[in-house]
Every structure is written in structure tokens, then in C-alpha cells.
Image: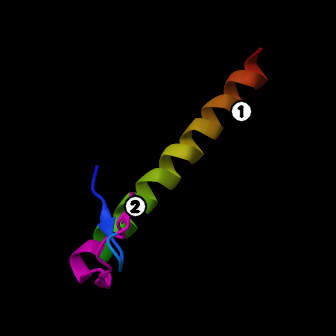
Amino acid sequence: MPYTNEEGGLLNNFAREPKVYQAEPPTEGQKRTYIILGIAATALVAGLILVAFFVSKSS
């Protein structure tokens, strides 16, 4: 376990903070992929709702 040293030689076992970095905005290719995945997910959910609707009507 990593320890930190304070002034005067005291040891503390507090968690070390990770390095902070700035996120990069998505590229055009990533944006296009997100849109395609969003459309596919919407179509899947709509299809499942339609199947559930038609199955419940036939019973």
C-alpha cells in the first residue's frame, strides 16, 4: 500500500489522487458511430415494443 510522507516524517496511507487530464471531444467518425448506434438501439427497442404489443393482442 502506498504511503505519503508529510512534513515532520509522518506517514499517511491516504489514497493518492490520480492524474487529471482533459477529455478530448469526439472526432467526426466517433460522432457518426454514436448516431448509428443510437438509431440501432432505438430500432431494437421499438421492435421489442411492437413484438410485445402484438403478442399481448393475440392472447
Q: Is residue 45 above or below residue 5?
A: above
Residue 31 image position (x, y, % from top left) = 32, 76
Q: Is residue 49 above or below residue 36?
A: above
Q: Mark 1 and mark 2: span between their CA atoms?
A: 52 Å
Residue designated by label 1: 53
User: Where is residue 10, by image quadrant?
Assistant: bottom left
User: Where is residue 2, by image quadrant?
Assistant: bottom left
Q: Which mark is residue 4?
A: none
Q: Is most of the magenta stretch helix, strand or loop?
A: loop
User: Where is residue 19, by image quadrant?
Assistant: bottom left
Residue 48 image position (x, y, % from top left) = 58, 36
Q: Quadrant of the C terminus?
A: top right
Residue at 32% across, 85% down:
22
Q: Is residue 45 left or right of residue 15?
A: right
Residue at 28% across, 84% down:
24
Please state which amino acid type lies under the numbered disc 1.
Phe
Residue in front for this viewpoint, 43 or 34: 34
Q: Earlier in the sequence, mark 1 or mark 2?
A: 2
Q: Residues within 10 Å of mark 1 (few under 14, many from 20)?
A: few
Q: Is residue 53 above or below residue 10?
A: above
Residue at 24% across, 82% down:
27
Q: Is residue 1 left or right of residue 12?
A: left
Q: Is residue 55 above or below residue 37?
A: above
Q: Dot 2: what SS?
A: loop
Circle 1 or circle 2, nearest the eye = 2
Please state which amino acid type lies under the numbered disc 2.
Ala
Residue 33 image position (x, y, % from top left) = 29, 67
Q: Which mark is residue 15?
A: 2
Residues in magenta, as a range: 10-30
